[in-house]
């Protein structure tokens, strides 16, 4: 398995296309008082600027921050270039967003000899064809590959070999685990869990008592276990996206601004997939990890981005005022029409990682 993650994708595209921005702290998103950062360059991240952060907070942290209006048509075009590079090496590609994907390279299509060499070839092609950089994680399951891609960012590669997964995971701070945000980290710290090793030392009964349905994921993750296949050939049932925030939010203006940002991101995915659907679902995860969702189904496909956004805001209005601040917001289009069935993937022996 390989996980490819573009480095500060939206912001890097802006720096590529506008040479005067190179080396400067850049944020993609609105700069108004109610604006939200959609993406931040690495120069901006050094000041603490993060995605989903209010623009006023970002500007306070980094007074020289340069804001760029998002250009999702350009980001989609570049994303398509990158996916063509992936498909040169394998048909088993599972995109997670415009800027990251899982690849199953069990079948060594071009005889490169190892998954690591394939990852290196992909990164080299991305740099040559798009003038952008990507980081790669190579391992024997998706969870470990995703952790590895973040290990040597930006423009890096990390390989976790068979037999090394559990030790690698247990050496990490708990905040590195996908799905554990700031509030989750705080809760775990109160429970004496600061590293993967601390988490692995807790039994399932303890985890269920404190984390409910999240317990099984935590138990397996702490041991580097993940049996999920790359799902490139699944029948798509929905198109959506979500954001976990660096700090909990609850104020209605901030919630609406954040929703607008998510609409932009999700609608780009909807257009890329040429999806048409009848149901819009808004999901909120509160800071106590409880999840609440509202949905609306039409008797026809959603007409366009404006209607998609309008329904999202209607659903948010139904949920206000919130009982607690939220740590995550997601928006999804489902009940898709005209989705073709695809052929099932074949089974094969695992290619060597390195």
Image: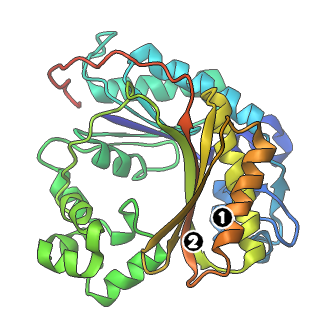
**Relative to the observer, which residue lies in front, 229 or 109?**
229
> What's the residue at 77%, 54% (across, down)?
310
Q: Measuring 65% from the left and 39% from the top, which residue is drawn there? A: 299
Dot 2 and dot 1 residues touching (CB under 8 Å): yes
The picture quadrant where one finds residue 352 is top left
- Name the residue tied to disc 2: 246
Image position, residue 93 (x, y; %): 41, 27
Q: Residue at x 67, y 35 (%)?
A: 301
Residue 23 visible in rendering: no
Up-down relation of residue 133 to residue 165 (above or below): above
Report the residue marked by disc 1.
52
Query: Above or below — where is 345 with respect to 172?
Result: above
Give the mark, 2 or 1, whose residue is nearer the N terminus. Answer: 1
Residue at x 26% of width, y 16% of height:
107
Q: Say which quadrant the C terminus sits in.
A: top left
Q: Position of residue 68 (x, y in %)?
A: 83, 51
Q: Quadrant of residue 344?
A: top left
Task: Looking at the picture, tell me which residue is in the foreground, 67 or 216.
Answer: 216
């Amino acid at each position: 398995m390989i996980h490819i993650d573009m480095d500060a994708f939206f912001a890097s595209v802006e720096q590529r296309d506008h040479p005067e921005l190179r080396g400067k702290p850049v944020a993609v998103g609105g700069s108004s008082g109610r604006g939200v950062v959609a993406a931040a360059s690495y120069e901006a991240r050094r000041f603490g600027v993060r995605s989903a952060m209010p623009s006023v907070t970002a500007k306070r942290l980094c007074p020289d921050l340069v804001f760029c209006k998002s250009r999702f048509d350009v980001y989609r075009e570049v994303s398509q270039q990158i996916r063509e590079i992936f498909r040169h090496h394998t048909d088993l590609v599972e995109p997670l967003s415009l800027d990251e994907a899982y690849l199953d390279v069990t079948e060594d299509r071009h005889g490169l000899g190892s998954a690591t060499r394939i990852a290196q070839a992909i990164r080299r092609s991305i740099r040559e064809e798009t003038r952008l950089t990507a980081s790669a994680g190579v391992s024997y399951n998706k969870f470990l590959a995703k952790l590895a891609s973040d290990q040597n960012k930006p423009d890096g590669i990390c390989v976790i070999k068979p037999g090394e997964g559990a030790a690698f995971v247990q050496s990490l701070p708990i905040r590195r685990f996908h799905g554990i945000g700031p509030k989750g980290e705080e809760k775990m710290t109160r429970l004496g869990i600061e590293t993967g090793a601390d988490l692995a030392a807790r039994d399932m009964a303890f985890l269920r008592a404190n984390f409910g349905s999240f317990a099984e994921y935590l138990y397996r993750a702490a041991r580097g276990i993940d049996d999920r296949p790359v799902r490139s050939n699944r029948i798509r049932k929905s198109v959506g996206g979500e954001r976990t925030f660096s700090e909990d939010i609850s104020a209605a203006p901030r919630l609406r601004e954040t929703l607008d940002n998510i609409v932009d991101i999700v609608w780009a995915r909807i257009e890329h997939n040429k999806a048409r659907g009848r149901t819009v679902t808004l999901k909120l995860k509160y800071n106590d990890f409880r999840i609440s969702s509202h949905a609306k189904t039409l008797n026809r496909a959603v007409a366009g981005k404006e209607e998609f956004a309008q329904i999202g805001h209607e659903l948010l209005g139904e949920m206000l005022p919130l009982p607690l601040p939220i740590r995550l917001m997601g928006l999804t289009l489902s009940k898709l029409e005209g989705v073709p069935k695809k052929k099932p993937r074949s089974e094969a022996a695992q290619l060597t990682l390195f």
